[in-house]
Image (tube, grey):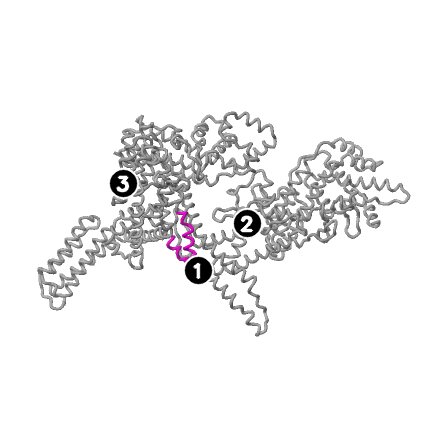
Amino acid sequence: MLDFLAENNLCGQAILRIVSCGNAIIAELLRLSEFIPAVFRLKDRADQQKYGDIIFDFSYFKGPELWESKLDAKPELQDLDEEFRENNIEIVTRFYLAFQSVHKYIVDLNRYLDDLNEGVYIQQTLETVLLNEDGKQLLCEALYLYGVMLLVIDQKIEGEVRERMLVSYYRYSAARSSADSNMDDICKLLRSTGYSSQPGAKRPSNYPESYFQRVPINESFISMVIGRLRSDDIYNQVSAYPLPEHRSTALANQAAMLYVILYFEPSILHTHQAKMREIVDKYFPDNWVISIYMGITVNLVDAWEPYKAAKTALNNTLDLSNVREQASRYATVSERVHAQVQQFLKEGYLREEMVLDNIPKLLNCLRDCNVAIRWLMLHTADSACDPNNKRLRQIKDQILTDSRYNPRILFQLLLDTAQFEFILKEMFKQMLSEKQTKWEHYKKEGSERMTELADVFSGVKPLTRVEKNENLQAWFREISKQILSLNYDDSTAAGRKTVQLIQALEEVQEFHQLESNLQVCQFLADTRKFLHQMIRTINIKEEVLITMQIVGDLSFAWQLIDSFTSIMQESIRVNPSMVTKLRATFLKLASALDLPLLRINQANSPDLLSVSQYYSGELVSYVRKVLQIIPESMFTSLLKIIKLQTHDIIEVPTRLDKDKLRDYAQLGPRYEVAKLTHAISIFTEGILMMKTTLVGIIKVDPKQLLEDGIRKELVKRVAFALHRGLIFNPRAKPSELMPKLKELGATMDGFHRSFEYIQDYVNIYGLKIWQEEVSRIINYNVEQECNNFLRTKIQDWQSMYQSTHIPIPKFTPVDESVTFIGRLCREILRITDPKMTCHIDQLNTWYDMKTHQEVTSSRLFSEIQTTLGTFGLNGLDRLLCFMIVKELQKIILRDRTVQDTLKTLMNAVSPLKSIVANSNKIYFSAIAKTQKIWTAYLEAIMKVGQMQILRQQIANELNYSCRFDSKHLAAALENLNKALLADIEAHYQDPSLPYPKEDNTLLYEITAYLEAAGIHNPLNKIYITTKRLPYFPIVNFLFLIAQLPKLQYNKNLGMVCRKPTDPVDWPPLVLGLLTLLKQFHSRYTEQFLALIGQFICSTVEQCTSQKIPEIPADVVGALLFLEDYVRYTKLPRRVAEAHVPNFIFDEFRTVL
């Protein structure tokens, strides 16, 4: 019969593919369970209020039209729904595909069983497949994996969350309308079971059997699989555990499968007492906590509580005397084997001969160690004991007392066992690779000795007083031939023959009185030694390694090992060289990967990479977590060094009196610094002793681990310092901004200096790490803050700044801002608010309107530059851009009520080149009618202007520091910028010249550089795309002349506010209007300027009719506006003179 797993055996390949797929699905479910968007849990009040109306559970399906009509009735809900869809459709689809694959899995399995029954696979039926060893294993695994999937889904992704996700997918995706969609079946399979993984939650009735029966499976198949699992050792594990007391450990994997599969036929658990007794006696006579898949543990006492037959059968095992007996037995065993292992691990004890002579003894010791570790770890685990269950508590307390349980001792046993196993495996691999060469070498040596002896007895060789003896000569020649004729490939015959040769050599020594000659004796002894070595060498078998692999399985501790993390970290802190021993433990844990990957590998499935990546990634994360204690301890020492360097140690001046030498020597503090530095370098040494290790399929380089760990700790501390340092009290007078920035600057400087100091002792690039990580923290926080302004939010897993290995911590917001950068920005906006302050452009300073005290100046930005660096200023700049966009969008959405007034005014003033008769009346009546819309308009325009001033200041500071700190970069950027602009202008004049193509990112990338170096003008930026708006120029013109009466001209300061009670600040007003106009077609600006020109000319025309003509204040304001407009936009003066005759400009300056 064909091999069941052969490529051309369709029956075997089909079931192998199903099982391989099952393992991959479980890995995907476990991976996804860490990415459940928090909103689907609707845990906190804010989420419930915001999203409660758009996230539904399955009650939605009772009347979808009703729910959708509720949504359609409220535009803001529709908007929120659309935003929610954009943000979550990707992850929801991923979850849906995982759920769909679970359903597809069971459909495929059922189809396979039907095919078997209908005879699709020739000569194969369910019975024959179950007779085949591989077939039997695969069928049992297929059903078991389906059960595990369902349990994993319920444990990791709560029922309510699943329902909400499925409904969201149903509402948001187009797939639901397609005919082949099996949405209904998936929803039926995965609807909530009422189970909750929270501690203390009640178990729903008939759980999980009712859940397992949602998709019916062939009953005879289930009972045959259970029959096989009850009677057979389907994986032939017992051969690896010959001792009867290890039997339950040998069958542990099978026991886990049986536990899961019994839920498919719950009647056995309820009523079949005899079957349950047989199962318990075979699989659970001395254990009741089992690991069902990759460390998911179950306590049978709790799990089988509702089932009468199962509960009764388990009572024998749980009898207190049995519990006590098992616990004290394992206590004794672990003490005994621990002493043995420590003996084996002594330097120089495990030599090759010793190992080869004692293989059974060493393997038995390994078995005892692993069995004891397994039993103690599982039965003392907190996760397997519900603290609210009195019986479980009693049993656990009993175990803890009787086994004299001490987690440290157990952990030490695990460490030593792992180390012992690792050394043995390495030795065996080495011996296996050299086996044949060594054997041949011993054979040659032995044969040569015999030939030499034959020569001695020929009387030719001058060996003292040996008489010629032809018989012996011939005999030794024959023996030499016999040794040479031994054949390596036929090891059994060779072994037998070698033993006979050894006996013959012993006999010849006795019978021929050769003892009297020492040299002959020596030759014979040497040859016997070589023949012994040959026997030893031929006994090195691959099976020993396989047995060690089976016995050393640690997959049950995949999750439990976490409870030992604190012990591991403590022992590393005390003795950093512990890391080398931990390496063996991590490698032992990595052997757990074989379990899910075996079938995927056999099936040559493309999932192999992603599944091994997931589990290896999990394990590497755990390794990082454990070793994080090293950077943590380093930073604790670093903080002390920072304190000493900044507060205690005085800088030595370039010249000093020799009698002051002692004061500056400061031997105490310097010794303390040296001691701390030494401690840090010892920690570094510890982690670097761990060689580069392959964990699963991920290569772990200790140097990289150390660097990542240092980065992680740095990020944690810097992020916390930034978060805590930038929290402001808005009521504080004066503002806390400058003192807080100074304080934070000192903290950051301390970090920076100590990092610089430490880099050589740790052998890392301190400055590089510092810049990369600080920029990442700031950019990430800016991104999160800007999410407030975006419809499609950037989630953590999409962010280019967030990382899984070196995560940037998130803190709960303390006010409306999400992060520290938002708080900093809003505090700056609060203290430079144009309603409270007045900005003097020439001095770059803000003054309080009422008290005329200085509020802040451009020094603020150099302080931010010192504290947060270029990234901080750049991030602030980006955030201001988003805020400007928001304000500009507010301005554009104006109401329609004043359309008629504008229409009348437009008719009165056209054509624009003419002089308006009776101008005062026309203008002032229009202002009066539109009065109500100006308050909000003024606020928005001033805010935009205020933010533009801040952006200009930031650009100045960035440009200044760029020219100062990296003048070559500044020069290169300026030249490249000029060259690019020249090329683009040339292209517009002659389109045959080159221009960057659509897909060329040059312009986009260079902009980022220019903005970071402050080589840009914020006033020229287009922030929003706009539509054509009727009357737009006239609205802005009216707005401007409505504000002019509130301002007056001051010889020293220019335009200032008339009354502090009605505050208007001139620079933000001009810049706000300028920015707004910049967003539209230049035609609008033309019209706007023409309207101002017309207003000036008409008003001046009216004045000239008076006896003593005088320029009205409003005209002075309008003229100053034009002058400032020309100055800020850097346009030639003729732009203004096109609308106002230049003699008026000249005249008004002399009058002022």
- Please say if the residues under marks 2 and 3 sit with CB atoms less than 8 Å apart: no
Name the spot of residue 316 as percent of width and height, x first: 29, 39
Residue 1109 makes an appearance in the image: yes
- Vertical placement of 1021 versus 98: above or below? below
- Looking at the rendered structure, the kind of residue marked 1 is Ile
Dot 3, how many residues are within 10 Å of its Cα: few (below 14), some (14-19), or many (20+)? few
Residue 764 sits above or below residue 1113 on the image? below
Kind of element beneath mark 2: helix
Q: Which residue is mark 1?
A: 682
* N-terminal-most mark, 2 or 1: 1
Q: Nearer the viewer, mark 2 or mark 1?
A: 1
In front of the other: 465 or 649: 649
Query: Identity of the amino acid at label 3?
Result: Asn
Give how far across and how far down residue 151 sits, in percent. 40, 36
Distance between mark 2 and mark 3 Cα atoms? 54 Å
Q: Earlier in the sequence, mark 2 or mark 3?
A: 3
Name the dominant secondary structure of the magenta segment.
helix
